[in-house]
Amino acid sequence: MDKEHVKGATDNVVGKTKEVAGHVTGNRKLETEGKLDQVKGAVHNAVGDAKDAGEEAIDSVKNAPSRQ
């Protein structure tokens, strides 16, 4: 798990906690902040996935047999 995926997981957990706390207490601002944090988490995960895909593509090109 790389840094982006860790940030994504953390933002998601924090966001879900804020959303539930805001819902239970009737604090719509906190609930909205929680939803936004969850979106941030999803973005971090998408960036991490894109980085992983890029690294895999580079590795496959490096390890491809040469055509000499």
Image: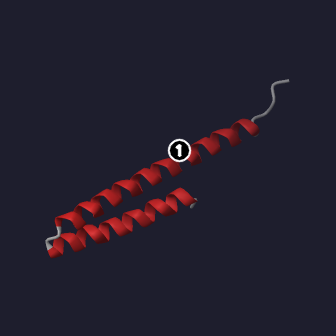
Residue in the picture at 45% in, 59% down: 8
**Image quarter (top left, top right, bottom left or bottom right) of the N terminus:** bottom right
- Please give left or right for residue 6 compared with residue 42 in the image: right
Estimate how packed mark 1 is, as few (under 14), some (14 to 19) or many (20 or more) residues with alpha carbons within 10 Å. few
User: Quarter holding the C terminus?
Assistant: top right
Q: Residue furthest top?
A: 68
The vertical placement of 4 against 64, above or below, is: below
Q: Residue furthest left?
A: 26
Where is residue 65 shown, x and y percent of the image?
A: 79, 33
Q: Position of residue 43 (x, y in %)?
A: 42, 50
Q: Is residue 5 above or below residue 43?
A: below
Of residues 26 and 49, which is closer to you in this image?
26
In the rendered image, residue 14, in percent from the top left (x then y), is placed at 36, 69
| Residue that label 1 marks | 50
Report whether 15 appears left or right of 60.
Answer: left
* Residue in front for this viewpoint, 30 or 3: 30
Residue at the far front: name it: 29
46 is higher (above) or lower (below) than 33 = above
Residue occupying image coordinates x 46% and y 53%:
44
Residue 19, quarter of picture: bottom left
Q: Is residue 49 left or right of residue 39?
A: right
Task: Say how many tags the image has.
Answer: 1
Determine whether, in the image, residue 25 is placed left or right of residue 15. left
Residue flagged by tag 1: what amino acid is it?
Ala
* Label 1: which secondary element: helix
For image coordinates 71% across by 35% down, the residue present is 61
| Farthest right residue in view | 68
Please name the residue shown 31% across and 67% down the image: 16
